[in-house]
Image: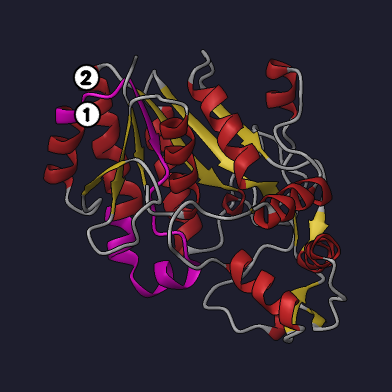
Amino acid sequence: MEQWLITGAGGQFGSVLLRRLTDSGVPATGLASPTGPSPDSGAVWRVDLADPAGLSVAVRHLAPRFIIHAGAVTSIQAAHDAPDYTRRVNIDATRTLVETARAIGAKLVLTSTDLVFDGTRAPYAEDSLPSPLSVYARSKVEAERIVLGFDHGIVVRLALMYGRPAAQRNTTFLTQLSALRTDAPLRLFADEFRTPIWLEDAATATLMIAESDITGVIHLGGPERMSRLDMGRVMARALGVSGAGIVAANQREMASPEPRPPDVSLVSARFERIFGRPPGRPMQQAMELLVTAERAP
């Protein structure tokens, strides 16, 4: 069987991809930060994405057929505070991976973000022009450009993801679940809109794309345009709690180092056209599956 390589294997999405492949008996190795969390399952190499020489050596040694590049500085705040480091991890590492993939004959899938758009002209299709507002978003646009210059490169733009990572790490989603279960105050934007997709659905769709002949850009979003507030209410219903702690908030009330796009809803028509189904299911359905799995003995 052909070897897979997942960068960002200790992250929210990379850990789920690695678990999915490992559980299916597919040869796969994850690259995780030397100082970050470990994935719950799968073979892992500790590699610093900011070290191009070390990254290239690791990839050449493993000689994968498929590379899914999910590793990145993803926090808007962290990217703003450390732009040089963000460039090394988000842009320079992508260039190293493209060069190495070309040398070893591998296919490369870059996971990108709906935040490459400024939120003023939603919904966004694959041919919509990026208009990034933050250091993080600009770094992803540049990484996209690098991958799109590679004949065997694919850019998967992901909407806001929710679900449990397959790594021992905290996420915004897990923090919100905890708050909902205790009726702790939970401020959620009523004026920020996304097309949220369950981590498990995003992983399934990304692996399907990687194994296909697709090139270029493809969007993966859920079927619903929802505010953060809408999402919180769906989570509360699935948990069977009142949601009494939910407080509607506006973007302007939250301190942010850089502007937040108001609406980056994605159109995932290309995936639907190629594979005959949407990439993700409605959030209520996904949350019910997630909660049922948690309660299983």
How far across and down, in percent of the image, does residue 180 sit?
A: 74, 75
SS of the residue at dot 2? helix
| Residue 291 position by quadrant | bottom right
Q: Nearer the viewer, residue 191 or 57?
A: 57
Q: Is residue 5 positioned above or below 196 on the image?
A: above
Q: Residue at x 44, y 31 (%)?
A: 21
Kind of residue at disc 1? Thr
Residue 16 on the magenta segment: no
Residue that numbered label 1 is attached to = 100
How far across and down, in percent of the image, does residue 246 sit?
A: 81, 79
Q: Is residue 73 visible?
A: yes
Q: Is residue 251 visible?
A: no
How far across and down, in percent of the image, does residue 169 sit?
A: 45, 64
Kind of residue at disc 2? Ile
- The type of colouring in the image is secondary structure
Q: Is residue 201 positioned above or below 233 on the image?
A: above
Mark 1 closeness class: few <14, some 14–19, many ≥20 residues within 10 Å = some
Q: Residue at x 81, y 56 (%)?
A: 226
SS of the residue at dot 1? helix
Q: Which of the image's four quarters has the N terminus?
A: top left
Q: Taking 98 as reference, is 228 left or right?
A: right
The reply to whether the C-beta atoms of the residues labelled 1 and 2 are less than 8 Å apart is yes
Q: Which portion, as a residue range, is magenta?
A: 61-88
Any mark on residue 104, and which? 2
